[in-house]
Image: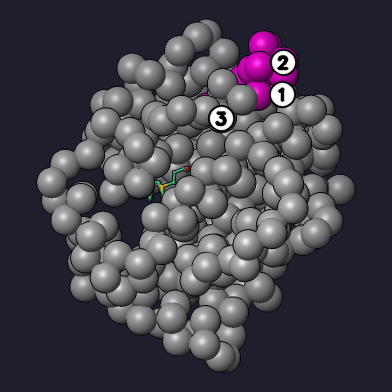
Amino acid sequence: MYDYVLGGKDHYQVDRDELERLRRVMPEVADLALENRRYLIRVCRFLAEQAGIDQYLDCGSGLPTTENVHQVVQRVDKLSKVVYVDNDPVVVAHGRALLEENDRTRFIAGDIFEPKTILGDDVVQQHLDWSRPIALMFVATLHHHKGDRHRPAEIMREYVDALPPGSFVAVSHLFDPGEGGDHETMAAFQQAVASGSLGGATARTKGEIEELLPGLELVPPGVVLLANWWSDGPNLKPLNAAQRLIAGVVARKP
Ligand SMILES: C[S@@+](CC[C@H](N)C(=O)[O-])C[C@H]1O[C@@H](n2cnc3c(N)ncnc32)[C@H](O)[C@@H]1O
């Protein structure tokens, strides 16, 4: 579905049908994916150019598309190392072939909600240098966690505890703005997602997203709508419903 929205070629009728069904609930739904991918690219540029990060652990990489993490960061520093993780069989098949483009880039199949397994993986341990800062990316993935609503905060704590000082964490997440019109829109959208092939997604408030970053310093402007996280230029048009329902943040481990 995500690939369909981003204009890729790796999607099936079932993906297109499901997206059209969601479009009936939220006509601008494609902008969730578009805003998310633009944020991911801006974050990678920030981490590589401004923060000097040259190691990345991308949890829930998704299907290869244009401008994947390694392409953006290796353009800044060609020696940057990237490990991608995903557990979707289609992503794993396509990911291995396309995301392992050079010897600085690796792909592993794994469940990102099992931090001990991912952190203990040989590739993750050996390809990245855990004595130097690493960027941990959880971009549009934590809202896919099913089960205990508080578990994602515990999962993130395990990852953050393992990161060396000076590391960065980037999170984007479906956003629940709290009471009001957008809250109702998000509730209707979550209900529609729950009844379809994705089987549910969990939106979080600003405070709940901040809880995913224990002990970290938020890079200004903190948790904001993705369209407002260092957008490439002024946002002259009002943000539509979909753009108002996805937020993100970048944070640093002191
Ligand atoms: C919406 S896509 C986001 C892709 C990419 N991070 C981006 O923002 O463009 C979510 C990805 O997370 C992956 N994912 C969801 N749950 C996962 C899990 N438990 N373990 C590994 N990957 C998972 C999905 O397979 C999918 O590729």
* Residue 75, quarter of the rendered image: top right
**Mark 2, other Cα within 10 Å: few <14 / some 14–19 / many ≥20:** some
Q: Residue at x 35, y 37 (%)?
A: 7
Disc 1, SS: loop
Q: Which residue is mark 3?
A: 69
Disc 2, SS: loop
Residue 100 in view = yes
- Residue 105 circle label: none
Q: Which residue is mark 2?
A: 77
**Mark 1, other Cα within 10 Å: few <14 / some 14–19 / many ≥20:** many
User: What is the magenta range?
Assistant: 73-83
Mark 1 or mark 3: whose residue is earlier in sequence:
1
Identity of the amino acid at label 1?
A: Asp
- Indicate left or right for 3 with 152 as reference: left
Observer-nearest of 160 and 220: 220
- Residue 54 circle label: 1
Q: Position of residue 187 (x, y in %)?
A: 41, 82
- Indicate left or right for 22 with 187 as reference: left
- Real-space Cα distance between discs 2 and 1? 7 Å
- Indicate left or right for 109 with 90 as reference: right
Q: Is residue 254 above or below residue 167?
A: below
Q: Residue furthest front?
A: 236
Identity of the amino acid at label 3?
A: Val
